[in-house]
Image (cartoon, grey):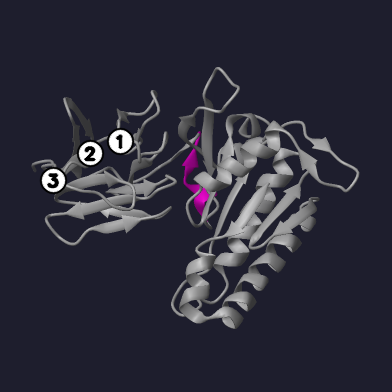
Amino acid sequence: MFADVSRSTELYETVGDMLAFEAIARCIALMKSCSEASGGRIVKTIGDEVMALFPSAEHAMQAAIDMQLAVSGLPAVAGQPMSLRIGFHHGPVLPDERGDVFGDTVNLAARLTDLASPGQVVTSKDAVECLPARLRQMARHLYPIQVRGKRQPTELFEAIWQQGADLTVTGNDLQRLPCSSLLTLRYEDVCVEMSDASALMTIGRGANMSIVVHDCRASRVHASIECRSGKYVLRDCSANGTRITIDGGHELILRRDEVTLWGHGWISFGPYGGDQAERVEFSCRRLSGPSG
């Protein structure tokens, strides 16, 4: 497992070295204590990131949930809530004489952490299949990614850790409110509509994405869109960021963050663009309610 403090660089810039260091140190202390309480061993700490090894996927997921709950209870710093990005995978590792571990399992766990948004726990199908029923029902399917050296895509899942989530999870999907609008996405000659609350759309250069884009600034898995509490939420999963323009307003730049889509607008890739930048057009149209 890897777990790191979200937006730590931004925190240093906002509140200064001393306050940022103290806030991050509190998070790391909680990450370590939660890991050890779940039977984990701290392999090492790298800046604002903790790497831990667990005897099973069950121990790792319980630690991840405990970490998120503990850090979410910390006071905000300069109005910014503290949050973690966590990724874990299940599989064999190669230990060395210093206590460090290496191998494909470690590399994939690190990549899952990179794909996680603030406050999110991302894991793999291999890990989910090893979980007991009480934890497996708290894992929601996200999307597949292609891993170097593997022929088949690796399916990713999100651990739903918020309080009360275990009461509203059935199978692998949260019981969410039905979407009250129809989302239409257009890219080149592709048009995709989304109205099912259980659906998840993906955008990126990967061949298995819902919308495959060709912009070199886009990641293989660049962004996802889901219907949450009756609204469409776009989450940036990319290395370079996502730019959103809604109804001709100011451009919003997302970096591992989320935004609710409404009205009409454009989704672009990377930190900057020009007139020729590739874009995905979106529009939200309210669905008519039942007559009575």
Q: Is residue 37 among what the camera can see?
A: yes
Q: Quadrant of residue 4?
A: bottom right
Q: Is residue 63 above or below residue 128?
A: below
Q: Is residue 134 among what the camera can see?
A: no
**Residue 47 image label:** none
Sequence-first disc among 1 and 3? 1
Gap in Å between the C-alphas at discs 1 and 2? 6 Å
Which residue has dot 3 on it? 286
Q: Which residues are magenta?
A: 164-171
Gap in Å between the C-alphas at discs 1 and 3? 30 Å
Query: How far from the left and from the top, in percent, is residue 58?
Result: 71, 41
Q: Is residue 207 above or below residue 290?
A: above
Left or right placement of residue 20 versus residue 102 in this view: left
Viewer-nearest of discs 2 and 3:
2
The reply to whether dot 2 and dot 3 touch (C-beta < 8 Å) is no
Residue situated furthest right in the rendering: 97
Residue situated furthest left in the rendering: 291
Q: Nearer the viewer, residue 127 or 257?
A: 257
Query: How far from the left and from the top, in percent, is residue 150?
Result: 59, 21
Viewer-nearest of discs 1 and 3:
1
